[in-house]
Amino acid sequence: MPVLLLAGCTSAGPPAPPSPAAAGTAASAGPITAAPAGSVGCHSPVATGRLPDWADAGFSGDTRMPHVLGARGEIVAILFGHPLTVGRGEGPTNKILWVGRPMSSSPDPAASTTLVITATRDGAGTPVVREVAGGPGPSIVDLPAAGCWHLRLAWSGRVDTMDLTYRAAG
């Protein structure tokens, strides 16, 4: 069932149509690709409520914290460095804890467990790649410019997408 996210990180004007990645469903078996370079706006809002039950292992008490859920619901980015910032001189880093939804079947033993993040900035066609060795877990994800970044996340034979906004320092 497609999901249309109405809240986003765009500044003004009418809402942009959802990216092809945001239209993916948990039942889809095909690959998800990042939104085209010319698309406009972030379509993955930062939630501030409780983490999904499957993502709160290791936390105690109140689990309300900034997080972004992948378009397929297969991964969540818990933002310890919210707001994410480019060129941050001091203060917290862009720390993100990636938590993958538990699998109902055994993962493909031939698939790499490394979380590969392919990020494309809205309006720019050159992707950058970041990796989290060992799969979803703690990371520092710095990206080279402020803006809305469309992320393709691949690990253990699984794929999901989300948008993250990085602001300029200052």
Image: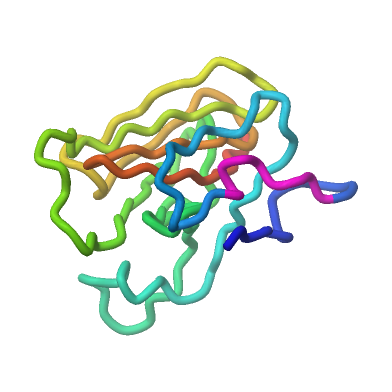
Tell me the residue at 62%/34% (across/down): 168
One can see residue 97 in this view: yes
Which residue sits furthest right? Answer: 13
Tell me residue 75's x, y (percent): 37, 54
Region of the chain picked out in magenta, as a range: 15-23
Query: Is 124 situated left or right of 72 in this image?
Result: right
Above/below status of 87 relative to 108:
above
Residue visible at 65% across and 24% down?
37
Q: Work out which residue is located at the far top of the displayed protein and give it.
A: 126
Q: Quadrant of the N terminus?
A: bottom right
- Considering depth in this image, is 165 or 95 the residue closer to the camera? 165
The colour scheme of the drawn protein is rainbow
Residue 7 lies, with reference to residue 22, above or below; the image says below
Residue depicted at x 26% and y 73%? 59
Residue 169 seen: no
Q: Position of residue 131 (x, y in %)?
A: 29, 30
Q: Which percent across, then down, holds residue 11? A: 80, 47
Kindly report the secondary structure that dominates the magenta region of the rendered protein. loop
